[in-house]
Image (cartoon, rainbow, N blue to C red):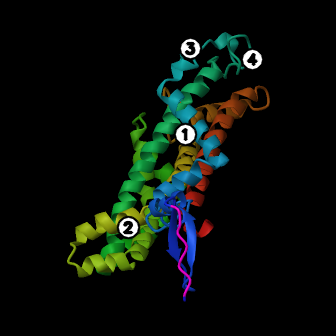
């Protein structure tokens, strides 16, 4: 006679094994396995995967380089908008009797060759540099992304034409082009400098955007959307652009610091921003002839410029590491 199966308590569950036997599981454990697919840690198939952007933000928050550079840039943006928060003086108020004097109470950076407070001018100089850098980067990114993205998507004659135009602009030296184009401009605002940077800066972003779009449009999900009858505009805006924009963001972030240094270079050469605009490049240019007798006039605006450019380059490196899947 076969043995009768033993009776189990109501507080347990029976799970059949491949060998035909039975394994007792506590009812609480069975309920847990039903609620959390794939194990107690919730790593089963129902767990939603993070997107590229959420994954990148997850990495950026744990990157000390991103945190440090982000705090520096945030501070620079705040003082560019509200410089009076840390500088109560007027950068255009000068006293020739104090020209080239060093640090004094209330004037920690000393005075320049015209008797203006170096500290106040250094603080107010962030406004022009940040404004030029941010607006030039936005203009370059928008123009280059549109032209390069369309060339990479449609190809053909448009791609060939844009590639030849891009080669022509790449052959123009940036500083020499600035000396030629801006020397005939008498406007003292930042807009001629921004326009010049957009004019000569878009080819780099355009080439990056073109290559990124060409790579993205060859993916299976784009081919599937095309087979389902999706229009060109829908494929470009919904499927290609979100997956091709990461390299553009990385290059634009690094280029922002480059445009700030370019503005300072052009102002130093006398063709960029012009007085009475307060700029680090203008102050560095006026202080260069006093570097032996009053080095403080040069060190403070040059140091502020170096820290700003370094912060944006560090931010670009951190964003690149977070968005590039090859570096994971």
Distance from Cα at disc 1 to Cα at disc 4: 26 Å
**Contact (CB < 8 A) between labels 1 and 4?**
no
| 3 or 2: mark nearer the eye | 2
Residue occupying image coordinates x 39% and y 78%: 219
User: Which residue position is annotated with label 4?
Assistant: 103
Earlier in the chain: of badge 2 and badge 1, it is 2
User: Which residue position is annotated with label 2?
Assistant: 148
Foreground: 208 or 242? 242
Distance from Cα at disc 1 to Cα at disc 3: 23 Å
Q: Is residue 7 located in the magenta-colored stretch of the structure?
A: yes
Disc 1 on helix, strand or loop? helix
Earlier in the chain: of badge 3 and badge 2, it is 3
Based on the displayed image, in which of its 4 quarters is residue 41 positioned?
bottom right
Relative to 143, is 22 on the left or the right?
right
Disc sitting over residue 49 in the figure: none
User: Which residue position is annotated with label 3?
Assistant: 89
Farthest-out residue, bottom: 1
Foreground: 31 or 170? 31
Say if 135 sits above or below 126 in the image: below
| 2 or 1: mark nearer the eye | 2
| 4 or 2: mark nearer the eye | 2
Q: Tell me the chief SS of the magenta region.
A: loop
| 1 or 4: mark nearer the eye | 4
Foreground: 130 or 271? 130
Earlier in the chain: of badge 1 and badge 3, it is 3
Distance from Cα at disc 4 to Cα at disc 2: 51 Å
User: Which region is colored magenta?
Assistant: 2-9
Residue occupying image coordinates x 72% and y 33%: 299
User: Callout 2: few (<14), some (14-19), or many (20+) C-alpha neighbours within 10 Å?
Assistant: many
Q: Quadrant of the N terminus?
A: bottom right
User: Which residue position is annotated with label 1?
Assistant: 267
**Contact (CB < 8 A) between labels 4 and 3?**
no
């Amino acid at each position: 006679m076969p043995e009768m199966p033993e009776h189990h308590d109501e507080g347990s569950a029976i799970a059949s094994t491949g060998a035909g036997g039975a394994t007792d599981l506590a009812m609480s454990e069975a309920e847990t396995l039903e609620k959390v697919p794939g194990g107690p840690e919730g790593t089963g198939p129902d767990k939603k995967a993070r997107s590229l952007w959420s994954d990148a933000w997850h990495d950026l928050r744990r990157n000390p380089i991103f945190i440090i550079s982000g705090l520096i840039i945030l501070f620079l943006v705040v003082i560019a908008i509200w410089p009076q928060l840390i500088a109560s003086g007027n950068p255009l108020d000068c006293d020739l009797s104090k020209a080239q004097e060093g640090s004094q109470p209330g004037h920690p950076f000393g005075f320049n060759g015209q008797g203006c407070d170096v500290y106040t001018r250094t603080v107010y100089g962030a406004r022009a540099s940040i404004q030029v850098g941010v607006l030039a980067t936005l203009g370059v990114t928008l123009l280059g992304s549109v032209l390069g993205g369309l060339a990479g998507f449609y190809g053909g004659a448009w791609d060939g034409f844009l590639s030849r135009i891009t080669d022509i602009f790449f052959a123009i030296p940036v500083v020499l082009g600035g000396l030629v184009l801006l020397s005939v401009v008498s406007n003292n605002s930042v807009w001629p400098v921004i326009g010049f940077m957009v004019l000569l800066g878009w080819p780099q972003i355009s080439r990056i955007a073109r290559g990124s779009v060409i790579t993205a449009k060859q993916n299976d999900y784009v081919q599937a959307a095309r087979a389902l009858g999706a229009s060109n505009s829908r494929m470009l805006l919904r499927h290609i652009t979100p997956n091709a924009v990461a390299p553009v963001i990385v290059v634009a972030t690094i280029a922002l610091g480059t445009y700030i240094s370019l503005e300072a270079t052009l102002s130093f050469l006398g063709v960029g921003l012009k007085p009475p605009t307060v700029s680090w490049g203008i102050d560095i240019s006026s202080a260069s002839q006093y570097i032996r007798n009053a080095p403080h006039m040069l060190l403070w605006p040059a140091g502020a410029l170096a820290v700003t450019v370094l912060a944006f380059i560090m931010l670009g490196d951190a964003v690149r590491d977070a968005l590039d899947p090859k570096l994971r």
